[in-house]
Image: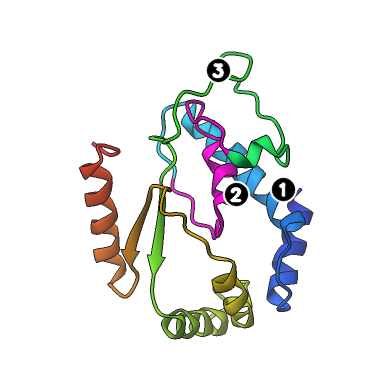
């Protein structure tokens, strides 16, 4: 699987947008890594561009109490088994208290300038030429519980805002 992810990074570095066939196995691998932390009741922070509800739902499936929505009913994701009880737990909720999404918002110009800097520093694999395709894919449904954050702030202020939001919703002690 590592070879596949390396090839995806090369694809993005060369300016080729990923397809669902590229993204879904990667998101499933991220989800599976999240499960290891969640079943041990540990906190994990994952940064990725889960741009559409169907991608975020794959990640939500890491929460054994999350009720499946439209994505799994289309049978496009692999089944999960939770090692904590030897099998899949019954879903209980449409809202996950274990998987939380935050969306950093900024202008396309600011994001492009940051991507250019990171590319020149060798700090990111995605070509800045892919930014518009990412923006075009981004969908946030009003019914999703996504915290929107101002990405123009300093990293320290963004972190404080994240901690405040998580505390407000009793998701962080």
Q: Position of residue 24 (x, y in %)?
A: 69, 50
Q: For the residue carrying disc 3, how many other residues have a C-alpha within 10 Å: few (<14), some (14-19), or many (20+)?
A: few
Figure check: 43 above or below 146: above
Which of the marked residues, 2 or 1, is nearer the chain's N terminus? 1
Judging depth in this view, the residue of 96 and 7 nearest the camera is: 96
Residue at the image point whose x is 52% and y is 40% from the top: 60
Residue 56's disc is: none
Which of the marked residues, 2 or 3, is nearer the chain's N terminus? 2
Q: For the residue carrying disc 1, how many other residues have a C-alpha within 10 Å: few (<14), some (14-19), or many (20+)?
A: some
The quadrant of the rendering that contains the C terminus is top left
Q: For the residue carrying disc 2, how many other residues have a C-alpha within 10 Å: few (<14), some (14-19), or many (20+)?
A: some
Asked if disc 1 and disc 3 are in contact, CB closer than 8 Å, the reply is no
Measured in 3D between alpha carbons, the distance from the residue under mark 2 to the one under mark 3, in whole angstroms, is 26 Å
Residue at image mark 2: 54
Q: Is residue 172 left or right of residue 63?
A: left
Disc 2 versus disc 3: nearer the observer: 2
SS at badge 2: helix
SS at badge 1: helix
Residue 25's disc is: 1
Judging depth in this view, the residue of 2 and 168 nearest the camera is: 168
Residue at image mark 3: 84
* Residue 24 part of the magenta-drawn span: no
**Magenta span of residues:** 45-69
Residue at the image point whose x is 55% and y is 17% from the top: 84
Q: Position of residue 53 (x, y in %)?
A: 54, 51
Q: Position of residue 18 (x, y in %)?
A: 71, 65
Measured in 3D between alpha carbons, the distance from the residue under mark 1 to the one under mark 3, in whole angstroms, is 23 Å
Measured in 3D between alpha carbons, the distance from the residue under mark 2 to the one under mark 1, in whole angstroms, is 13 Å
Disc 2 versus disc 1: nearer the observer: 2
What is the magenta segment's predominant secondary structure? loop
Residue at the image point whose x is 55% and y is 56% from the top: 50
Disc 1 versus disc 3: nearer the observer: 1
């Amino acid at each position: 699987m590592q070879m596949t992810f390396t090839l995806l990074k090369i694809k993005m570095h060369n300016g080729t947008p990923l397809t669902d066939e590229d993204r879904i196995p990667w998101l499933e691998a991220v989800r599976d890594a999240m499960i290891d932390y969640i079943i041990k009741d540990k906190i994990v922070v994952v940064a990725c561009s889960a741009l559409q509800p169907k991608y975020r739902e794959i990640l939500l499936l890491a929460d054994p109490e999350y009720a499946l929505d439209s994505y799994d009913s289309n049978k496009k994701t692999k089944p999960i088994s939770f090692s904590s009880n030897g099998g899949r737990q019954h879903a209980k909720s449409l809202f996950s208290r274990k998987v939380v999404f935050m969306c950093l918002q900024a202008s396309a110009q600011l994001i492009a300038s940051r991507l250019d800097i990171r590319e020149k520093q060798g700090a990111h694999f995605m070509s800045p030429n892919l930014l518009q395709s990412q923006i075009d894919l981004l969908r946030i449904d009003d019914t999703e519980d996504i915290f929107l954050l101002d990405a123009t702030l300093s990293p320290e202020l963004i972190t404080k805002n994240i901690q405040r939001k998580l505390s407000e919703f009793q998701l962080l002690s």
